[in-house]
Image: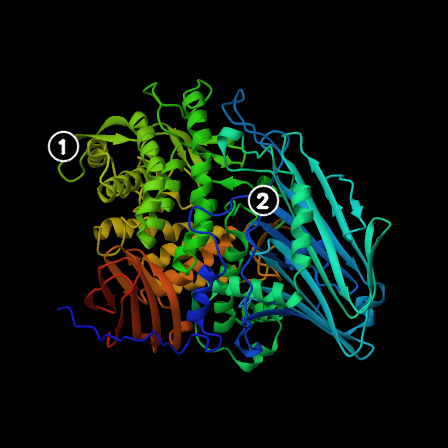
């Protein structure tokens, strides 16, 4: 029987920062004028004057979460060693070299290429840099301080403070301690480099701003500013600017560089952007925007502020998001704590010992990257916001067959629902282009996946999409349903009906596409032996392997089933489209659902008892119903189906690319197999050296295809933390399960606060000896849910905003 929960009226929690208060900084989002969901600043636009604080938001050193290192990043190893910063639109890789600071800047909208409107003779969309285009760098900022070369300094240390969003470095030269701080301010829309010293030292050197596409940098001596502006042949205009202010010395422009002499402190401010606009009707351009002029305006406005005002505004804004979740997975040893982050990562693998504080830090690093890379702009692509050159693999695009979706599995789970909005905004802005291309080209005779019916409606996507409304590579028919799955699940976390109304056209258009695509066929019922007619997906493949002309693939059947179910729920909540909802419901009832192969004992990937592809393939497409869906889950389906899914997952193995390991870990957590899930998490934390797929010095997920060449894909940096949360809390609307897959490494004690759960709640949780000590549930719109752990369950009913604390789960 359900037990009556113990109710508490206060919001105290021992794991929240005591001063300044976590609760106080959660309210700063409103005070600082942050953008609202699905209505923020989507591109490089004028910035409203930020609200400046009257109190310091800075944390004491002991309250911060740090990554730290004993050497700067190498210029040729920036993607693996440099520390990232970003404000959701502009990103930076920071070397922290004492004598030559390098900052590689990107803007999420800086893309070459065009909107592809044709198919080639093989039925593919053009997919190369010269047509599809590529995400590319904006500029390189360099700060040269000739008498501060690394070999002449001592006590060097650089760090990334995840708690406050700050990249820092310090060192000693001639008895003087020099410090620098770099951050990307969202309110001021600039990147700030601040150089200070303690002990009477001085800075003398110069600053350069170099374009990466052959641009000519110009100087404005009256403003001590360097800038450039240019345009690609696709009509995208872009620009960047930098200025500097000093204390106790001089700053001027000479010979195309900003020079500074004998300054006791120096503040460098840089920004840039493009005239990209998320509007298909304007061909994704704002013809009236001059990015170079706007960049000069923004750096001048920021430079008029004191360095303290800029820093405090940034930290308060950042903490308003970061403080929404805390995590402890137990205590590490003093020996582990004495190691820098890279040595600690290597020791963890060499000694095969858990390092709970490092493992929790890895999750928080994922949250830092999310806050830094996805706010009021384009969504995170394969590279996030970080490049070390202009030729990223796969053009740094948006892959629709797991990568863009995995980038956002973490957002709602870890208190960063606002960061999800960039994905929804992108899909809505691209919908007119995707619909037009679908209706013009999907049934082209060259498309091997065209509809047998000869009809087409609604929209779908290719495997790759770009920011110009274009598609690349092969058509990906189920991609629309998978994108809609992600979009609808965000609603399940927030219960925001205004948001649901905005994405409703995406859901409906995808259903309309599948209404023209599903094919009726007859199968034999395995239980009765009788024939029955079912609906199956038309000719397709199971990404990215196997035959390309099979029908009824498990991947498509599962995501279309979920699409139809979610569309019907949306119609019910919004009170619209009742007649079409019934039509979709009738199709859903007739959908063929996957079975277990009598030959292999695995869940079938194709409508065949034979395995037609690669046994250990990186994609887990046939397990969509297990994760990210949850139609297949313990207690909800037959033991045969669950065993078949488990057997298939086992066959896929535990050694793959980072994103594939993350997906496997999530599936094992969904199956409540804690040690399997933890092992895959641990595999992703292995140092990426000697050709091993794993984690680089800066904790970026790297895999090596050739000796000495690492490829960065950011999806594992989000998918792996998602797996950690899934081990601690599983939820679907109406049900929350605590510690469903807690591994032995974290069982002794731990806590997590701010976990978002589907159904409109937030969970805070403490445990010891593998058992829940206390769970606090807060409604953000949800009403009633069951809460269970270790076989004990009770039902909770709350009003929005109300909290309850539960104990004694046994």
Number of the label disc, if any, that sits on residue 288:
none
Image coordinates of residue 695 in percent, x first then y, are: 57, 59
Tag 1: Cα neighbours inside 10 Å, few (<14), some, or many (≥20)? few
Q: Which image quarter is the N terminus in?
A: bottom left
Q: Secondary structure at mark 2?
A: loop
Residue placed most toward the observer, 690 or 141:
141
The answer to whether 211 is drawn above or below residue 165 in the figure is: above
At x 55%, y 82%, the residue is 334
Residue 250 appears in the rendering: yes
- Provide the residue designation for mark 1: 530
Which residue is tagged 2?
44
Q: Is residue 109 left or right of residue 357?
A: right
- Looking at the image, the residue that sits furthest to the bottom is 334
Image marks 1 and 2: residues in contact by CB distance under 8 Å: no
**Residue most extreme to the right:** 255
* Measured Cα–Cα span from mark 1 to mark 2: 61 Å
Colouring scheme, one of rainbow, by chain, secondary structure, one colour: rainbow
Left or right: 69 as drawn, with respect to 126: right
How far across and how far down the image is residue 340, in percent? 62, 72
Q: Nearer the viewer, residue 646 or 495?
A: 495
Closest to the observer: 396 or 100? 100
Q: Secondary structure at mark 1?
A: loop
The quadrant in which the C terminus is found is bottom left
- Residue 474 picture location, percent across and down: 48, 30
Q: Name the residue located 83 percent from the left edge and 77 percent from the top edge.
A: 174
Quarter-wise, where is residue 694 in the image? Answer: bottom right
Mark yes or no: residue 618 visible: no
Indicate which label's residue lies in the foreground, 1 or 2: 2
Q: Earlier in the sequence, mark 1 or mark 2?
A: 2
Residue 796, image x, y percentages: 21, 65
Q: Is residue 723 left or right of residue 625?
A: right
């Amino acid at each position: 029987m359900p037990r009556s929960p113990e109710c508490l009226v206060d919001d105290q929690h021992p794991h929240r920062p005591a001063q300044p208060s976590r609760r106080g900084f959660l309210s700063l989002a409103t005070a600082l004028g942050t953008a609202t969901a699905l209505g923020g600043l989507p591109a490089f636009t004028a910035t409203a004057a930020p609200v400046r604080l009257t109190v310091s938001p800075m944390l004491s050193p002991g309250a911060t979460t740090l990554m730290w290192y004993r050497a700067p990043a190498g210029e040729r190893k920036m993607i693996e060693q440099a520390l990232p910063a970003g404000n959701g639109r502009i990103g930076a890789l920071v070397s922290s070299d004492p004598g030559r600071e390098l900052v590689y800047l990107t803007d999420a909208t800086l893309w070459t290429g065009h909107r592809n409107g044709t198919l080639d003779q093989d039925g593919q969309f053009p997919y190369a840099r010269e047509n599809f285009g590529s995400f590319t760098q904006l500029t390189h900022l360099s700060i040269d301080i000739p008498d501060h070369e690394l070999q002449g300094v001592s006590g060097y240390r650089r760090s990334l403070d995840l708690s406050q969003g700050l990249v820092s470095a310090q060192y000693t030269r001639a008895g003087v301690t020099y410090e620098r701080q770099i951050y990307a301010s969202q309110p001021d829309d600039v990147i700030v480099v601040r150089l200070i010293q303690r002990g009477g030292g001085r800075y003398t050197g110069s600053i350069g701003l170099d374009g990466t596409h052959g641009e000519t940098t110009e100087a404005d001596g009256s403003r001590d500013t360097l800038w450039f502006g240019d345009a690609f042949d696709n009509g995208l205009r872009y620009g960047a600017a930098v200025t500097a202010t000093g204390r106790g010395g001089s700053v001027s422009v000479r010979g195309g560089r900003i020079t500074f002499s004998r300054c006791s402190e120096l503040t460098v401010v840089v920004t840039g952007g493009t005239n990209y606009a998320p509007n298909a009707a304007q061909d994704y351009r704002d013809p009236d925007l001059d990015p170079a002029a706007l960049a000069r305006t923004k750096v001048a406005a920021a430079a008029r502020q004191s360095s303290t005002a800029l820093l405090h505004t940034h930290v308060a804004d950042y903490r308003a998001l970061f403080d929404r979740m805390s995590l402890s997975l137990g205590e590490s040893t003093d020996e582990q704590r004495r190691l820098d982050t890279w040595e600690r990562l290597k020791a963890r693998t060499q000694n095969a010992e858990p390092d709970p504080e490092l493992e929790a830090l890895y999750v928080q690093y994922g949250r830092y990257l999310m806050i830094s890379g996805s706010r009021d702009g384009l969504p995170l692509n394969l590279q996030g916001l970080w490049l070390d050159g202009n030729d990223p693999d796969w053009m740094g695009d948006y892959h629709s067959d797991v990568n863009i979706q995995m980038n956002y599995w973490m957002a709602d789970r870890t208190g960063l629902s606002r960061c999800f909005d960039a994905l929804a905004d992108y899909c809505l802005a691209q919908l007119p282009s995707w619909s037009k291309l679908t209706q013009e080209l999907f049934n082209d005779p060259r498309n091997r996946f065209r509809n047998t019916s000869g009809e087409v409606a609604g929209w779908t996507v290719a495997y790759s999409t770009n920011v110009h409304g274009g598609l690349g590579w092969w058509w990906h028919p189920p991609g629309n349903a998978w994108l809609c799955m992600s979009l609808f699940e965000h609603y399940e976390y927030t219960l925001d009906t205004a948001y649901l109304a905005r994405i409703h056209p995406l859901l409906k258009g995808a259903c309309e596409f599948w209404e023209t695509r599903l094919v009726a066929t007859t199968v034999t019922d395995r239980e009765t032996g009788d024939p029955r007619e079912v609906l199956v997906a038309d000719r397709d493949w199971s990404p990215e392997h196997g035959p390309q002309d099979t029908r009824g693939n498990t991947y498509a059947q599962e995501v279309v089933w979920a699409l139809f179910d979610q569309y019907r729920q949306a119609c019910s909540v919004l009170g619209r489209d009742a007649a079409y909802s019934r039509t979709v419901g009738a199709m859903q009832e007739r959908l063929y659902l996957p079975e277990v192969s009598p030959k292999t004992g695995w869940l079938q990937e194709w409508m065949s008892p034979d395995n037609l592809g690669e046994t250990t393939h990186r994609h887990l497409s046939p397990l969509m119903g297990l994760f990210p869906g949850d139609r297949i889950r313990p207690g909800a389906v037959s033991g045969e189906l669950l065993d078949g899914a488990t057997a298939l997952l086992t066959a896929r193995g535990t050694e793959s690319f980072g994103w594939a390991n993350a997906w496997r870990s999530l599936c094992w957590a969904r199956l409540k197999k804690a040690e399997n899930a933890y092992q895959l998490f641990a595999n992703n934390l292995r140092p990426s050296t000697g050709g091993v797929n794993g984690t680089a010095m800066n904790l970026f997920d790297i895999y090596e295809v050739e000796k000495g060449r690492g490829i960065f894909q950011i999806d594992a940096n989000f998918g792996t933390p998602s797996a950690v949360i899934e081990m601690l809390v599983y939820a679907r609307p109406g049900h929350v399960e605590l510690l469903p897959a807690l591994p032995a490494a974290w069982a002794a004690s731990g806590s997590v606060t701010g976990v978002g759960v589907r159904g409109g709640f937030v969970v805070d949780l403490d445990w010891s000896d593998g058992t829940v000590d206390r769970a606090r549930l807060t409604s953000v719109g949800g009403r009633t849910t069951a809460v269970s752990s270790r076989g004990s369950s009770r039902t909770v009913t709350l009003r929005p905003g109300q909290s309850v604390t539960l104990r004694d789960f046994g």
